[in-house]
Image: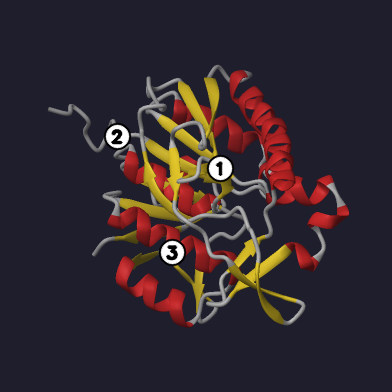
Amino acid sequence: MSTTTPETAPTVVKLGGSTVDDLADAWWDDLAAYAGRRPLVLVHGWSKPLKNLGARYRDPSAILRDRYGNQSRWTTPEVIEDIKQVSAELAADVLARLERRGVTGERLLGSDGLVTAGEGERWWWKDKQLVELENLVGPITGVDPTPLKGLRPGHVHLVTPLARDTAGREVNTDADRAAAAVAGGIGAGQLVLVTDVAHLLIDDRPVHRITAEAAAKFRDKGATGGMRKKLRAAGEALEGGVERVVIGSAPVTDLVAERTGTVITRT
């Protein structure tokens, strides 16, 4: 029988690739203090460092849209290697920040047995034509929590959200949805999506608390861009057994205490 309680269950925090450089020292102080109190898994994005790597990643043609309207980075084996390069540098920076504050950590590639993906979409719009392309992006189909062994306070696991598909290839996945899948897979009590906006806004008004059903309705009718993906990830996390999801830009302690940000609950 599991001895995990709501107070001791792991927390998963997803760090946006565009936010890491902008987080103040006090934010990292808070994260280290939080990690000292309960098990913590971080999942990071890589959008900003990848764009900084070369002009081709800033070109609009690097983003594809499938026949259903979903967007994805056009991912080739070379792009996978570039993602791994910038992710290694980002991970080293994050773990060093925590180590200076007394928290140990280790990095894990999702493709090293943690995250599995299914067959990806093959038809994409390119030059105003729907063409068949190999795009190494796949929907997450499962999480094996075994590689995340030794979850404990004072020691952080940092996950790079690549996955392994049924053909054994490394594929790109959405970091928010990967964080949601990991949270469900390890029995996390909460998922925190750290972004560059303070709250979910509906009709230009900040939302402090919302149910998964109401969030899904807004996602399908009014949300755009990155927030739409975050709301989808939130719904998947809650369906996977996570108690609540918090979205915001504040220190993690403030977000989980519901002093700020937007809390999404099952009911």
Q: Element under label 3?
A: helix
**What label does residue 9 carry, if any?**
2
Q: Position of residue 166 (x, y in %)?
A: 45, 46
* Image point (71%, 39%), residue name: 81
Residue plotted at (61% across, 53% down): 136
- For this view, does 259 lie left or right of residue 168? left
In the rendered image, the vertical position of residue 30 relative to residue 228, given as above or below: above
| Image point (39%, 38%), residue name | 11
- Can you give x and y, in whole percent of width and height, for residue 79 in the image? 72, 47
Figure check: 121 above or below 1: below
Q: CA distance from mark 3 to mark 1?
A: 25 Å
- Mark 3 in CB contact with mark 2 (< 8 angstroms): no
Identify the element where label 2 is drawn. loop
- The residue tagged 3 is 232
The extreme right residue here reads 55
Q: Earlier in the sequence, mark 1 or mark 2?
A: 2
Look at the image and tell me in which quarter the C terminus lies.
bottom left
Of residues 23 and 237, the one drawn nearer to the viewer in this rendering:
237
* Residue nearest the viewer, comparing 84 with 4: 84
Question: Can residue 167 be seen from the camera position used here?
Answer: yes
The answer to which image quadrant residue 234 occupies is: bottom left
| Kind of residue at badge 2 | Ala
Q: Is residue 255 visible?
A: no
Q: How is the image coloured?
A: secondary structure
Give the Cα distance between marks 1 and 2. Answer: 32 Å
Q: CA distance from mark 3 to mark 2?
A: 23 Å
Q: Nearer the viewer, mark 3 or mark 2?
A: 3
Give the residue at mark 1. 169
Of marks 3 and 2, which one's residue comes earlier in the chain? 2
Q: Nearer the viewer, residue 183 or 143?
A: 143
